Amino acid sequence: MRTRDLELLQQSFDVLIIGGGATGLGIAVDAATRGYRTALVEAGDFAQATSSRATKLVHGGVRYLASGQIHLVYEALHERAVMLRNAPHLVQALPFVLPAYKWIDLPFYGIGLKIYDLLSGQSTMGPTSFLNRKETIQRLPNIATKNLCGSIVYHDGQFDDARLALALARTAQDHGAVVLNYVRSRSFIKTGGKITGAIVQDFETGTELIVHAKTVINATGIFVDDLRSQDDPSIPRLLSVSRGTHIVVAAAVLAGETAIMVPKTPDGRVIFAIPWSGRVVIGTTDLAATTVEMEPGHQESEIEYLMETINPYLATPIHRRDILSVFSGLRPLVTGKSSKTSKLSREHHIDSSPTGLITVAGGKWTTYRRMAEDVLNFAIKGGMLPGKPCQTDAVKIHGAPTSGAPIAGPLFRYGTDAAEIERLQQSDPQFAATIDAALSFTFAEVVFAVRHEMARTLEDVLSRRMRALLVDAKAAERAAPAVARLMAKELSASPDWAQEQVAAFQTLASTFYLPK
Ligand SMILES: Cc1cc2nc3c(=O)[nH]c(=O)nc-3n(C[C@H](O)[C@H](O)[C@H](O)COP(=O)(O)OP(=O)(O)OC[C@H]3O[C@@H](n4cnc5c(N)ncnc54)[C@H](O)[C@@H]3O)c2cc1C
């Protein structure tokens, strides 16, 4: 499949997209479903950078309401409904409790959340309501009860970011696009001063390939400025980046299926504690970052900040020893007037250079589909593509059941692909076993990831096809040797390959758990 796709890449395309995160993959789905000949290259794995490190919310953004960005909230709420409709196996509604420890907080936040619900109109995920003290404790048995008056419950969406990215890649392929991970765009090809393609390099073999395209789109997230300066070294930077860090703890910390929203942190932000993938994700920080890098790491002060902010809301506070994983991502924020990154706009930005390179940056995961639509309409308006209408409002994402309810059970996130994994589990008792006692993923999922989900490295499997690294970094590290051996067999790779993969993964995993 990969060999065939690398060959197909050497054709002429209408659209070449550089970057396989939420933004680029969304554009690939949109372009392919409009009927353009489409190619996408991703330097690493799909969603390896920012798009696998989100707080996992599909949301309008309650806090943007407070800052008066009504248009942004309204647009995102619309997109939330589209995502739920088209990817019900990866996006679900989730109740959030905003606990009130002062009576005044109930009407104060209640009005805002009622407006949030009103803005979502028909696409509401559930009504906003008030709970008294007793009802709040019933819902969240581990909530801190001292001075608790009651709470407000509202609803938003949550999702599996890396798996949605992969499902978008597969949707684009289902509609005829050529989509490849581990292929980096190295330089642009220019004819008469205009970009007409790119020279790309296959990471695995080092081979360079020429890809011709009418339109080239720079969707490289935090790296957009690198490509812009490849095109024009004198161009000013577009982005500021800020780091957001999350900690992951056991499900018992919330003891239920309801999230907590902390409406105002000491630095004027909001943070969440969210049940996700059998654990609780707590985040996020917002710290200006100076270097743009794939693995931004975290600072000790961020861990302290998250624990200090969430612990007053918990009857049993969390300690460092409870933290199963720490993950951080960099937000691509379009530089604005404020020097505080938390104040920079989350709206997206699209521009084109005199050579015709289209750059898209900013935005949110939730608005990926709208960003894609805007980018392609921008190209059409600029005469770079023939006009074709956007279809994605109604395009089902790979794995979505065509009718009826989403697939239930532990493999629900695979949607219609769950049947193949069940078949693998039944075909061999070894495949039915879990990869580690602390994790619910099975070896059948490893085989499936290699055969059908373009997984090329141990990290692809343990971090993004299954979310082992994020839910329990030490358990993922323990599982690494057995998973690597099975992958080596599936990929016809040598035992040395497996050992190298394990060593690289251990180095990475050690940055996801805290030293004792
Ligand atoms: C901490 C945090 C929490 C967030 N939480 C949420 C949330 O809960 N909900 C929400 O809606 N949004 C959230 N966001 C925002 C959302 O995650 C981002 O807006 C989105 O993921 C950005 O996607 P992207 O495709 O633009 O960038 P990326 O995901 O970074 O993708 C860019 C890709 O380009 C590739 N690339 C770079 N250079 C090249 C090259 N030369 N050739 C080929 N490929 C290249 C990179 O490898 C990378 O994979 C959050 C962001 C952060 C940082």
Image (cartoon, rainbow, N blue to C red):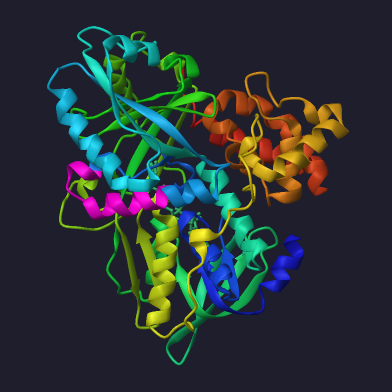
Question: In this view of the protein, which residue sits in the foreground, 230 or 159?
Answer: 159
Extreme residue toward the left, this view: 104
Q: Position of residue 369 (x, y in %)?
A: 45, 58
Is the residue 339 above or below the residue 129 in the image? below
Q: Position of residue 312 (x, y in %)?
A: 26, 15
Is the residue 250 above or below the residue 365 in the image? above
Is the residue 229 above or below the residue 392 in the image? below
Question: In this view of the protein, which residue sits in the foreground, 118 or 180?
Answer: 118
- Residue 388 shown in magenta: no
Q: Quadrant of the N terminus?
A: bottom right
- Residue 68 shown in magenta: yes
Quarter-of-image position of residue 260? top left
Question: In this view of the protein, which residue sits in the foreground, 12 or 27?
Answer: 27
Q: Main secondary structure of the magenta part?
A: helix
* Residue at x-position 30% and y-position 74%: 234
Which range of residues does the magenta coloring cover? Answer: 64-80
Residue 125 horizontal side relative to residue 99, left or right? right
Residue 63 horizontal side relative to residue 403, left or right? left
* Residue at x-position 52% and y-position 59%: 394
* Residue 319 seen from this side: no
Quarter-of-image position of residue 441? top right
Extreme residue toward the right, this view: 427
Is the residue 50 above or below the residue 369 in the image? above
* Residue 147 seen from this side: yes
Q: Position of residue 448 (x, y in %)?
A: 74, 43
Residue 447 horizontal side relative to residue 90, left or right? right
Q: Position of residue 490 (x, y in %)?
A: 81, 44
Question: For the image shown, how many numbered marks are present on the structure?
Answer: 0
* Residue at x-position 38% and y-position 75%: 378
Residue 212 horizontal side relative to residue 434, left or right? left
